[in-house]
Amino acid sequence: MAGLYLHIPFCKQACHYCNFHFSTNQKHKKDLIEALCEELQLRAKELKSVPLESIYFGGGTPSLLSVENLNTIFQTIDAYYNVKPDAEMTLEANPDDLTAAYIKMLSETKINRLSIGIQSFFEEDLQEMNRAHNAKEAIECLKIAQRYFDNISIDLMYGMPQMSAERWRENLKIALDLDIKHLSCYALTVEPKTALEHFIKTAKHPPMDDALAAAHFQVLIEDTNKAGLIHYEVCSFGTPETFSKHNTSYWLGKPYLGVGPSAHSFDGEKRSWNVSNNSTYIKTLEQDQLPLTVEFLTPENRFNEYLMTGLRTMWGVSLSKIEEKFGMEFKNQLLKNAQKHLNSKTLVLENDVLKTTIKGKFLCDGIVSDLFIL
């Protein structure tokens, strides 16, 4: 099985924390969709007819696409790809785009899952992030979407210096009271070349507080557990039937194809990524060429990638699988590197599987970097 990711590089405005590739100029949206469909056609052979179990529209803001745009893309996918009948088809969406009319029209397309960028239910937080929607729209769009979609995920953000533990807990309460079954929750981080980085450097915004983010994370663990949601990945909480098939395929090392500007692909042996420039992307595909760079992965690269993704999940990393795929030397080195984290109880070894503990989940990125073989 494989996944297909489509990067839609348009936004109404720039969120202060975001460093994903996007443009606020939608003038060439039609040309970009044509180029994206051309790339889909040119790269279909890369999956060698492997069935698609998930299709994911990310961005950017995919909810800026019209239903006609989506149907055009789906027609191309249907013509060149083998899509499983029960494939998960996700559209990332912003609340200000999700009018009742648009939601109803989306429900009549092949989209069967919405991932909605709520971020916060509080006006102050949304203004601080420079989000395009307001708190009222955040709640209203969810109530309407639930009439048409059974599978809805929302994004929430924590760790903001101005957000108290009480307000973060209230954010979670609002989501859970609305009977949202899947949450993706992220700590605010300072990415290079973002407005947030500039504001912190010029003292217009307080710096991040790791202790506050850790406290918010603990609240998140406690409250989602009480609500019966499973913490199946560092940032992901849901009921088993709502686990993201697409994101899980990344974490389990399945192949995926990424189309659109800046999109990444992985086939188990190599990864590739498209140019992060809309104009260059369009012009290159107009010449029937692919605007991508390819990197063949060394055994060390593949091992590190397996650790980086697997340790984020509740399934962890299998030592027997490491031995089978990479050899005894890699397994022994991993155990050696992991010992201090086993001692500090941020990692645990159970039934030949290495996993992060609750204590280790918040520190996962740092732990994984310690385990890399360079």
Image (spheres, rainbow, N blue to C red):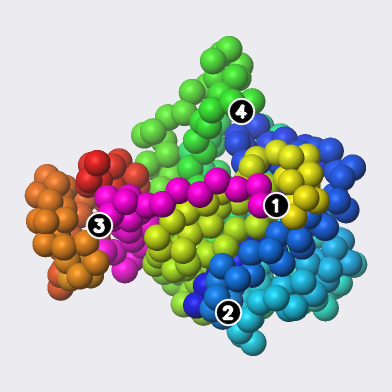
- Which residues are the magenta region? 289-317
SS at mark 3 in the image: loop
Is disc 3 surrounded by few (<14), some (14 to 19) or many (20+) residues within 10 Å? Answer: some
Tell me which numbered mark, 4 or 1, is placed earlier along the sequence: 4
Quadrant where the C terminus is found in the figure: top left
Is disc 2 surrounded by few (<14), some (14 to 19) or many (20+) residues within 10 Å? Answer: some
- Three-letter code for the amino acid on which mark 1 is drawn: Gln
Q: Nearer the viewer, mark 1 or mark 3?
A: 1
Q: Nearer the viewer, mark 1 or mark 2?
A: 1
Tell me which numbered mark, 2 or 3, is placed earlier along the sequence: 2
- Three-letter code for the amino acid on which mark 2 is drawn: Ser
Check if mark 1's residue and mark 2's residue have beta carbons within 8 Å: no
Residue that carries the numbered disc 3 in the rendered image = 357
Is disc 1 surrounded by few (<14), some (14 to 19) or many (20+) residues within 10 Å? Answer: some
Marks 1 and 2, how far apart in space?
21 Å
Residue that carries the numbered disc 2 in the rendered image = 49
Marks 4 and 1, how far apart in space?
31 Å
SS at mark 4 in the image: loop
Residue 261 can be seen in this image:
yes
* In-image side of 48 versus 320 (left or right): right
Q: Which one is in front, 138 or 356?
A: 356
Expressed as whole percent of the image width and height from the top left, the position of residue 105 reads 86, 72
